[in-house]
Image (cartoon, helix red, strand yellow):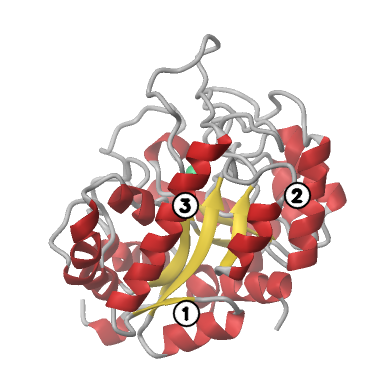
C-alpha cells in the first residue's frame, strides 16, 4: 500500500524498548533504525504501515519466569527495577540521538502533532509498573524531568503502590485490594506533574480508587472488552462507562489472549475480532473514546498482521466495516492526541 494513503496510527502501547533491551546492547539502535530485525516494530516497518508513534513502555520483567505460589507473577526489587528502568530510558534517548531526527521523545501534545506531521516517529516515554520508584517518589520527579509523561502504577503483579490484576481466564478483574497509601500519593503527584496514569494492568478496585482520586481523563492504554473476552485484563461495561464519563479512552489490544472469547493463545485469529472490540467500544461509549493499543513486541497477535508494517490492513478492515474517514482518524490518532493534550495541558 502506498505511503500517502496510510492513515497515521498513534498507538497506546508497545514493548519495543524491552525487546531491544533484552538483546545485546551495541546493536539496538541499528536494528531499530535500519530494520530487518525480529519483533513487530522498527523504523522501516513503522513507515510502511503508517505507525506514526506511540507510548513506548519501559517494562521490567518479573525476576523469574516461574510464577509464585499463587500462580502469579513475582515483583522485581526497587534497586534492580531502577537500574533496568534507567537503562531503557537511556536506550530511548540513544534511539532519538542516533535516528538523526527520525524519532522524537515527545513531551507535549504539540510535540506529538509536529512529529506526526513531519513523518518523525512520535515516541512517548511510559513506564509499565513503577517498581523503580520508591515511596519517596524521588525517581518520579527525576524521570519526569528526563521526559516521562505516562505511567501505569502496576504491571500484573503487586508493588508498593497497588495490586496489579493477575492474568486469569475466565475471570472478573475484581481481584484483590486497591491503591495503597503510597499509591494515592503517586496518583496525586502524577496529577500535579500532569503525567498520564494508565489503568490497563490495575485490578478493578485500583481502577475505581484512581477514578475517585484522579482529575485526569481515565485511560486504559491497551485493554479490551470483557463482554467479548472475559479475561481479567479486560474492561467491564461499568469501567468503559467511567472512561466515557471522564473523556478518556480505551486502546484496543491486538493480543489474541485479550481478543478471543475462548482465551486461547492462538495466532490463527481473525482481524475481524479486533474490529469487533473496536466496534463494541464505539457503540457503547462513543467514537471519541476508542483508540488503539497494539501491544506490539509484547504479545502474540493475529498471524494475519505480521508486524507494524501491516497496520493498514486493520485500517482497511475498519473501513470495510463501516467506519468513515473521520472515525478512522479519531480511532487511529485523534483520540489519543486529544486525551494527551487534556492530561498534559496545551
Ligand atoms: Zn501491558
Q: Position of residue 176 (x, y in %)?
A: 72, 23
- Marks 3 and 2, how far apart at CA: 18 Å
- The disc at residue 186 is 2
Q: Is residue 186 above or below residue 215?
A: above
Query: Disc 3, disc 2: CB below 8 Å?
Result: no
Q: The N terminus appears in which quarter of the rendering?
A: bottom left
Of pointers 3 and 2, the one earlier in the residue sequence: 3
Badge 3 element: strand
- The disc at residue 58 is 3
Q: Nearer the viewer, residue 6 or 199?
A: 199
- Marks 2 and 1, how far apart at CA: 39 Å
Query: Mark 2 or 1, which is nearer the eye?
Result: 2
Left or right of residue 64, residue 234 in this image: right
- Marks 3 and 1, how far apart at CA: 33 Å
Q: Position of residue 295 (x, y in %)?
A: 42, 50
Label 1 environment density (alpha carbons within 10 Å; few <14, some 14–19, many ≥20): few
Ligand 1 within 8 Å of disc 1? The answer is no
Query: Which quarter of the picture shows residue 102?
Result: bottom left
Query: Mark 3 or 1, which is nearer the eye?
Result: 3
- The disc at residue 325 is 1
Query: Which quarter of the picture shows residue 178?
Result: top right
- The disc at residue 216 is none
Ligand 1 within 8 Å of disc 3? The answer is no
Label 2 environment density (alpha carbons within 10 Å; few <14, some 14–19, many ≥20): many
Of pointers 3 and 1, the one earlier in the residue sequence: 3
Badge 2 element: helix
Q: Is residue 9 above or below residue 127?
A: below
Q: Nearer the viewer, residue 170 or 44?
A: 44
Q: The C terminus appears in which quarter of the rendering?
A: bottom right
Q: Residue at x 74, y 59 (%)?
A: 190
Label 3 environment density (alpha carbons within 10 Å; few <14, some 14–19, many ≥20): many
Query: Which quarter of the picture shows residue 34?
Result: bottom left
Amino acid at each position: 500500500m502506498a505511503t500517502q494513503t496510510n492513515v497515521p496510527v498513534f498507538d497506546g502501547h508497545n514493548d519495543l524498548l524491552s525487546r531491544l533491551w533484552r538483546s545485546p546492547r551495541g546493536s539496538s539502535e541499528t536494528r531499530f533504525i535500519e530494520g530487518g530485525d525480529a519483533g513487530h516494530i522498527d523504523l522501516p516497518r513503522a513507515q510502511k504501515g503508517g505507525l506514526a508513534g506511540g507510548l513506548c513502555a519501559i517494562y521490567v520483567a518479573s525476576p523469574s519466569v516461574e510464577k509464585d505460589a499463587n500462580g502469579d507473577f513475582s515483583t522485581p526489587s526497587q534497586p534492580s527495577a531502577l537500574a533496568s528502568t534507567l537503562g531503557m530510558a537511556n536506550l530511548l534517548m540513544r534511539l532519538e540521538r542516533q535516528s538523526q531526527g527520525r524519532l522524537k521523545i515527545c513531551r507535549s501534545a504539540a510535540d506529538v502533532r509536529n512529529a506526526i506531521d513531519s513523518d518523525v516517529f512520535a515516541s512517548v516515554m511510559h513506564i509499565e509498573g513503577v517498581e523503580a520508584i520508591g515511596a519517596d517518589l524521588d525517581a518520579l520527579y527525576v524521570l519526569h524531568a528526563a521526559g516521562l509523561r505516562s505511567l501505569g502504577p502496576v504491571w500484573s503483579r503487586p508493588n508498593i503502590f497497588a495490586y496489579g490484576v493477575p492474568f486469569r481466564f475466565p475471570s472478573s478483574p475484581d481481584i484483590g485490594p486497591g491503591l495503597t497509601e503510597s499509591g494515592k500519593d503517586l496518583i496525586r503527584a502524577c496529577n500535579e506533574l500532569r503525567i498520564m496514569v494508565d489503568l490497563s494492568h490495575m485490578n478493578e478496585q485500583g481502577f475505581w480508587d484512581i477514578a475517585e482520586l484522579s482529575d485526569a481523563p481515565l485511560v486504559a492504554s491497551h485493554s479490551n472488552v470483557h463482554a467479548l473476552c472475559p479475561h481479567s485484563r479486560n474492561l467491564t461495561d461499568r469501567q468503559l462507562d467511567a472512561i466515557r464519563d471522564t473523556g478518556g479512552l480505551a486502546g484496543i489490544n491486538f493480543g489474541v489472549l485479550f481478543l478471543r472469547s475462548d482465551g486461547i493463545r492462538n495466532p490463527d485469529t481473525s482481524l475481524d475480532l479486533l474490529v469487533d472490540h473496536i466496534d463494541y467500544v464505539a457503540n457503547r461509549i462513543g467514537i471519541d473514546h476508542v483508540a488503539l493499543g497494539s501491544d506490539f513486541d509484547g504479545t502474540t497477535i493475529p498471524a494475519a498482521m505480521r508486524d507494524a508494517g501491516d497496520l493498514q490492513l486493520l485500517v482497511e478492515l475498519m473501513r470495510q466495516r463501516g467506519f468513515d474517514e473521520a472515525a478512522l482518524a479519531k480511532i487511529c490518532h485523534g483520540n489519543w492526541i486529544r486525551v494527551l493534550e487534556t492530561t498534559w495541558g496545551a
